[in-house]
Image (cartoon, grey):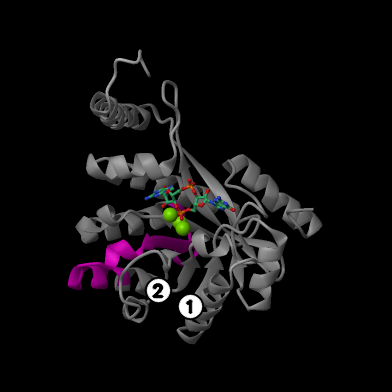
Amino acid sequence: QVKGNGRNNFSFYESKMNDEVNRKVAINIRLHRALKEKTLEMYYQPLIDLNTQKIIGAEALMRWTDSELGFVPPDEFIAIAEKNNLIEQLGSFALNTAAEQAAQWQVITPLQIAVNFSSVQFRDCEKLLTEIQQVLLKTGLPANKLDVEVTESLLINQEGELFDMLKSLRNMGVELSIDDFGTGYSALSYLQKFSFTKLKIDRAFIMNLTKNKADQSLVTAIIAMAKALNLKVVAEGIEEDEQKQFLIDIDCEYGQGYLFSPPVTAKKFEALLHQQANSNSAFT
Ligand code: C2E
Ligand code: MG
Ligand code: MG
Ligand code: MG
């Protein structure tokens, strides 16, 4: 969009700002359409037991390729959906699709399905709790095979109602994960208070694990703390064998990352499950 040399800095930044606003507006409009036309998709990334290398679960991740905008990353469109009253519908789609899929996969192998929830979806705790109950009922997915992933941002400035809702989920048997651990700001005491079952160490700490001593200390400490609190630990974003080995050596039980598999379509994920059932390993 750069025109002749007559442009000054002001108009350059102004037009850049316009581009950003226009893109947000376009995403909002196209996302409404995508919901109507059912062009959103769920992909699934294997969750691995690091010691056995077996798939023990999947994280459901939303994918959207628009005919005009092309591929739009979820970080970008989720944020826009949160501001435009679309997140409840996106969240319902993710939960229903993933639970239905996971219920079918139980026949191949028992596995847990992790679904991401936006903090905005918890504005009406009662409604969300009812929806989760109904989806479990409808799909027949056992409650302990559903893992609700939330981020620390949910816990800021929230008290009674949220506490009760998360407690109800736990009482039903649903598992609760804290996602992107280490990137938020809340006090660690929430880990106890809210009865989480799992902690997912953010990719940012895994990325330089083999080179950065500070990250090694942090990750080692997080794992020790998690164990002391009876929390399962998942390392996100494992890309290299050396990272995996380091994590095994410090007793990290679970992992996720491109080293094993990127998020894939339901069909491809199912093929991995069959491969594992037939040959004992999904990755050889
Ligand atoms: P997240 O929940 O922390 O998901 C993990 C992200 O890390 C995913 O990005 C995944 O594709 C990526 N990832 C996994 N392994 C590796 C690796 O080895 N290397 C690298 N570089 N990346 C890896 P994705 O799919 O782009 O999703 C980004 C974020 O968007 C998610 O972060 C989550 O916060 C949000 N999101 C995705 N789907 C949904 C959804 O259905 N509902 C909600 N509320 N949020 C979603
Ligand atoms: Mg997640
Ligand atoms: Mg994460
Ligand atoms: Mg994230």
> Residue 248, how many percent across, how many down?
67, 73
Point out the image quarter for the N terminus.
top left
Above or below 167: residue 129: above
Q: Is residue 39 left or right of residue 194?
A: right
At x 29%, y 44%, the residue is 87
The amino acid type found where label 2 is placed reads Phe
* Label 1 lies in ligand 3 vicinity (Cβ under 8 Å): no
The magenta stretch spans residue 60: no
| Cβ atoms at labels 1 and 2 below 8 Å apart | yes
Please state which of residues 199 and 16 is positioned toward the viewer in this rendering: 16
Q: Quadrant of residue 53?
A: bottom right
Q: Which mark, by number, is residue 205?
A: none
Crowd band around label 1 with a 10 angstrom C-alpha radius: few (<14), some (14–19), many (20+):
many
> Residue 282, how many percent across, how many down?
73, 54
Above or below 158: residue 89: above
Q: Earlier in the sequence, mark 1 or mark 2?
A: 2
Q: Is residue 68 left or right of residue 107?
A: left
| Residue at the disc numbered 2 | 196
Query: The magenta stretch spans which residues?
Result: 139-166
> Residue 257, how many percent across, how many down?
60, 55
At x 41%, y 57%, the residue is 136
* Label 2 lies in ligand 2 vicinity (Cβ under 8 Å): no
Above or below 62: residue 166: below
| Residue at the disc numbered 1 | 231
Cα separation, mark 1 vs mark 2, equals: 7 Å
